[in-house]
Image (spheres, helix red, strand yellow):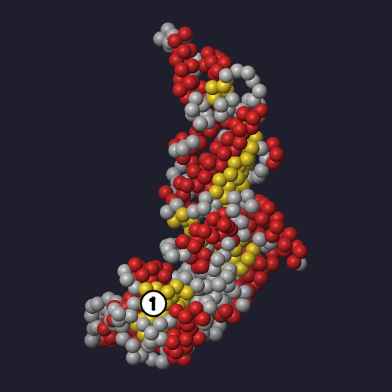
Amino acid sequence: MIYLDNNATTRVAPEVVAAMQPFLTEHYGNPSSAHALGRKMKSAVEQARDQVAALLGAAEASEIVFTSCGSESDNWAIGGFLEQNPNRRHIVTTRVEHEAVRNLCEHLAEIGCEVTWLEVDRNGELDLDDLRRALRRDTGIVSVMLANNETGVLFPIEQIGKIVRENSDAVFHVDGVQAVGKIPINLKDLEIDLFALSGHKLHAPQGIGALYVRKGMTLPPFIIGGAQESGRRGGTPAVPNIVGLGAACELAAKPEGHEHVRRLRDKLEDEILSQVPNTSLNGTSDRSRRLPNTANISFQYVEGENIMMLLDEAGICVSTGSACHSGTHQASPTLRAMNVPYTAAQGAIRFSLGRYNTEEEIDRTLEVLPGIINRLVEMSPYEKELRALETAKANYE
Amino acid sequence: MCLVEAYLIVSRFDKQRAGNLAFNSSQMESLSPVIKENFLRPQNVGDLGAKGFTGRAGSIVCGAALRVSLSIDQSQRIVDARFKAAGCSCLVGAASYLTQEIKGELSGEVAALLQPPANTIREALGEIPGERTHCVTLICQALLSAITAYSDSVRDEWHGEEALICSCFCVSERAIESAIRTGGLRTIAEVTKACNAGGGCRSCHSLIEDILSDCASQYPDTSGY
């Protein structure tokens, strides 16, 4: 099995499993208990909080609150702010956010909030002047992702934070789910108030997330209950998962592995774009403005689902840029927002690599893929368009 | 057909409506055995060129594009069928299976089966996930339009003097009567299967009923003997 779908989820690291193991066996106390077993759990949670804070470059560990997932973190950040500030109902966000933000904002727009959606260009990038124009004195919250889950395009959150501060009183929330563990982050140097992350994207198990809440900012609890997490989130903490997230953050903070992922991604992307005639890259070609692990490539005039299924047959896991839901088979909102032509968006494949991929796996993928594409090209009714692409490529070379 | 243009129109409206569309993996398991087998090893991919009758279908909502071509002989029988598709696995599988199954069949009979709701065809393809049933509609539309292209050409070339009953496939009263007498036919479906009449628009069905009952009265039921 060759797993090139690390933006969907990642394999739990052996180091993470080892760290969690005692908390699934002999350490079974409740961290709220005052006895020895409870204190053991409590100190494990606090150690994990330090590890997460260190990876994010947070000023203080107390700025980290554990949640159940990235979506909870996003919902808490935006929903919590609005609950606290019912009169500041203007939200600024982008067209390409993950559903956790996008669908939440759609919902908020339906129930009386005003949402300004920032557009992206063909490269998937924002025009910061759009942001300046969108900000108003009554803007409550600005929510922008750090890295796009589909294309890997990075938004300039450092600049965005400054623009938000200079032009409004809004709080700035960043969905960092797809970026944490893949690129360095230093929150104490950024004008960011809220920052969401999810454990399973960086080799921790599913079911654990966190929200960074800048010191001095308070949010009403998303889950009302006991005094856990300093009263910021009720519910007994999922200690094994929290310990796992801490271990995963410590692993990600080490330099080893990151360059390896980048090199394999570059190789895969370069080879596909140069070897397969009907391809185009989705997202900026400037790799410094994209995640080092993601390549989103359109195989024009063929169907992405078929590529995905034939790769699956060959033991290679990837994702498609479109999905058939309730009778409509549409390109992802991100690709549509980028105005990727229909016939290219339908054939979009996301390859997302991780630290456990090997050079052999990339070679194997490059060996299998051209045959699959060729087979589907032969099946495609867009012969004229495909011929035109080949001619254009031949002329270019 | 320009799906790109259609998309641009749709997308302007759609941007307002964030669909619940994520990068996801579809489930090979949800395909019926017939469709899965045909998707993995598709038959009849290609084009018959000038000797074929072409039919197309496309969907603005799902972006699929499909083209079929049929070769139909003097006896109105489909002798070859090919397809090209840029669509989901379900469309490819259904197109592969149906192009194979209709070979050797009378064009009118196939046309009758393809018309909505095309239940016989849907049953033959096996269970299809709810959101994919439109794939079957698309392949039926494309095949029907190819058969229509054929029937149009037959009509254009028709020079006979006899009265036509089925104008879709140019079948005369005499031919229908002869088929009924020779085969001892009793239903419209049997007539279509025997001589192609009635497989198209169905406007001649009442006329065929009349011929059937005329023949039946001249040749009373002998099945009891």
The reply, left or right, for residue A45 in relation to residue B195 is left
> Disc 1 marks which residue?
A91
- Residue at 58% over, 27% down: B169
Is A42 on the left-hand or right-hand side of B74?
left
Q: How many marks?
A: 1
Residue sitting at x 47%, y 88%: A162
* Above or below, A212 relative to A311: below
Of A111 and A298, the residue lying toward us: A111
Using the image as rendered, state which of residue A322 and residue B54 is in the foreground: B54
Q: Nearer the viewer, residue A99 or B203?
A: B203
Question: What residue appears at the point 29 percent right and 79 percent down from the top-left corner?
Answer: A86
Classify mark 1: helix, strand or loop.
strand
- On the image, which quarter does residue A306 sit in? bottom right
A10 relative to A276, above or below: below
Quadrant position of the C terminus of chain A in the picture: bottom right
Whether residue B9 is visible here, answered yes or no, is: yes
Q: Is residue A365 above or below residue B34?
A: below
Is A340 left or right of A326, judged from the image as shown?
Answer: right
Whether residue A104 is visible to the viewer of this picture, yes or no, is: no
Q: Could you tell me residue B218's position as x and y percent?
A: 47, 8
Amino acid type of disc 1?
Ile
Q: Chain of mark 1?
A: A
Residue B99 image position (x, y, % from top left)? 58, 39
Q: Quadrant of the N terminus of chain A?
A: bottom right
- Residue shown at the point (46%, 42%) measured from the top left: B126
Q: Position of residue A104 (x, y in %)?
A: 37, 70
* B115 is higher (above) or lower (below) than B165: below
Mark 1 nearby-residue class (10 Å; few <14, some 14–19, many ≥20): many
Q: Position of residue A309 (x, y in %)?
A: 54, 56
